[in-house]
Amino acid sequence: RYSRDEVLAKLDEYHASVMSANWADYLVLVYSGPFWEAEFEKLTAAVQPYLHEDAVGKKFCTVQEMMDVLYQCEDVRDHLNELAELVTRASGFMGTGYAPGEKVENMDENAKLCAEAYDEL
């Protein structure tokens, strides 16, 4: 069990670590994500005795919101990666035109929706 000050320090350190990471770098997220998730579970348990306190409760809410936004950004990025893969497949095997996949006909619409999703975040 951690003291209130230790929990606040851990929350601050966790928030700074995740927030300062390059969320646009896929490998950073792949390599760090599992560790962040494990640490978030530990923090969630450690914070429970102090959630009723204003400072701890607010800080934990900030950390939760940050993680929610991170996951939403990952979802949008994953969608963009899927679109890029579909466009690549539409040019056929190794860009030769042999056995091409279906073209993405509404790419402009997808780009607009993705931009709107990022703006909302």
Image (cartoon, rainbow, N blue to C red):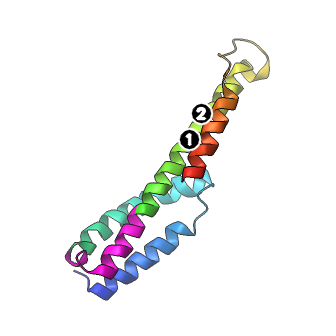
Toward the viewer: 5 or 25? 5
User: Of the residues shown, which amino acid type is indicated by label 2?
Assistant: Glu
Report crowding for label 2: few under 14, some 14 to 19, many 20 or more residues within 10 A (C-alpha). Answer: few
Q: Quadrant of residue 84?
A: top right
Residue under the image location 70 percent in, 31 percent down: 108
Assign the magenta stretch its main secondary structure. Answer: helix
Residue under the image location 50 percent in, 67 percent down: 18
Work out whether 32 lies above or below 45.
above
Toward the viewer: 85 or 12? 12
On the image, numbered disc 2 is attached to which residue?
82
Residue under the image location 74 percent in, 12 percent down: 98
Horizontal side of 74 relative to 51 (left or right) equals right
For the N terminus, the quadrant is bottom left
Work out whether 115 lies above or below 98.
below
Query: Could you say which disc has been placed on residue 69 in the image?
Result: none
Horizontal side of 103 relative to 74 (left or right) equals right
Residue under the image location 71 percent in, 27 percent down: 88
Toward the viewer: 42 or 116? 116
Discs 1, 2 touching: Cβ within 8 Å: yes
Image position, residue 83 (x, y; %): 63, 31
* SS of the residue under disc 1: helix
Work out whether 102 lies above or below 24.
above
Over which residues does the magenta segment extend?
49-64
User: Of the residues shown, which amino acid type is indicated by label 1?
Assistant: Asp
Q: Is residue 51 magenta?
A: yes
Residue 107 visible here: yes
Q: Is residue 20 magenta?
A: no
- For the residues marked 1 and 2, what is the alpha-carbon distance in whole angstroms? 6 Å
On the image, numbered disc 1 is attached to which residue?
78
Residue 35 visible here: no
Image position, residue 121 (x, y; %): 54, 54
